[in-house]
């Protein structure tokens, strides 16, 4: 009886020591490197620019490696109160691309309108469903024919970093939110 218990204890200890020496189980890396993001973003925007490279580099320095991105387009306009509407695809490694829509109001010293291509870096989502919620943010724009910029939106641990380039005539700064959704719609709230 004592010998059987001793053998069981030894077996459990051997398994524990083996798992400690082996380390944690290998997980597939589900994040994107800066080279991968820069290549995809350059293709999406139609060519690599120094401005795009510096924005991607800055975002990686501040937030690290994203585990997803949204490639899409949007249009917006404002006269003190603004509206923004967009659509695109959410991309993550080892999953199929998923259609996504966003819309939201803003308020601030903001005047004009613009149409943009948007490439959003997505941080800390565990599943595609995590993005379907409201993300508050502060945005500033200065478009005269064309422009290029980036801001952050955050809700709890999830961070979105939209990189926009577009055309239009717009100037200002605003406070608002974007509601990311599965379906199209016109009500911005």
Image: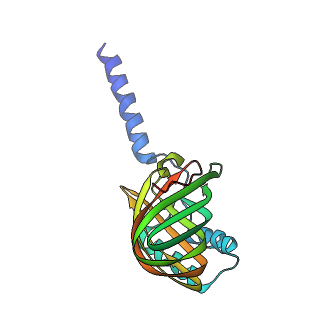
Where is residue 57 shown, x and y percent of the image?
51, 77
Where is residue 71 shown, x and y percent of the image?
62, 63
- Residue shown at 69% from the left, 72% from the top: 43
- Residue shown at 55% from the left, 55% from the top: 186
Where is residue 54 shown, x and y percent of the image?
53, 82
> In screen coordinates, is 176 left or right of 167?
left
Q: Nearer the viewer, residue 144 or 153?
A: 144
Where is residue 175 shown, x and y percent of the image?
38, 69
Q: Nearer the viewer, residue 63 or 111?
A: 111
> In screen coordinates, is 90 left or right of 25?
right
Please tell me whether residue 147 is drawn above or below residue 33 in the rendered image. Answer: below
Residue situated furthest top in the rendering: 1
Quadrant placement of the N terminus: top left
Is residue 92 visible in the rendered structure shown here? no
* Colour option used: rainbow
> In screen coordinates, is 40 left or right of 109?
right
Quadrant placement of the C terminus: bottom left
Q: Nearer the viewer, residue 171 or 152?
A: 171
Please tell me whether residue 130 is drawn above or below residue 16 in the rendered image. Answer: below
């Amino acid at each position: 009886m004592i010998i059987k218990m001793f053998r069981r204890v030894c077996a459990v200890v051997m398994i524990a020591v083996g798992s400690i020496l082996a380390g944690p189980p290998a997980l597939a890396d589900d994040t994107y490197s800066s080279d991968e993001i820069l290549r995809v973003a350059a293709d999406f925007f139609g060519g690599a620019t120094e401005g795009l490279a510096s924005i991607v580099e800055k975002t990686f320095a501040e937030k690290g490696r994203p585990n997803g991105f949204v490639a899409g387009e949007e249009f917006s306009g404002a006269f003190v109160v603004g509206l923004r509407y967009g659509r695109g695809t959410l991309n993550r490694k080892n999953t199929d691309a998923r259609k996504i829509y966003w819309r939201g109001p803003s308020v601030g010293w903001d005047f004009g309108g613009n149409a943009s291509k948007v490439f959003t870096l997505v941080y800390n989502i565990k599943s595609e469903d995590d993005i379907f919620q409201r993300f508050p943010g502060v945005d500033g724009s200065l478009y005269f024919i064309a422009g290029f910029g980036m801001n952050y939106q955050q809700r709890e641990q999830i961070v979105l970093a939209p990189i926009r380039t577009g055309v239009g005539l717009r100037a200002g700064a605003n406070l608002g939110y974007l509601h990311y959704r599965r379906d199209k719609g016109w009500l911005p709230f």
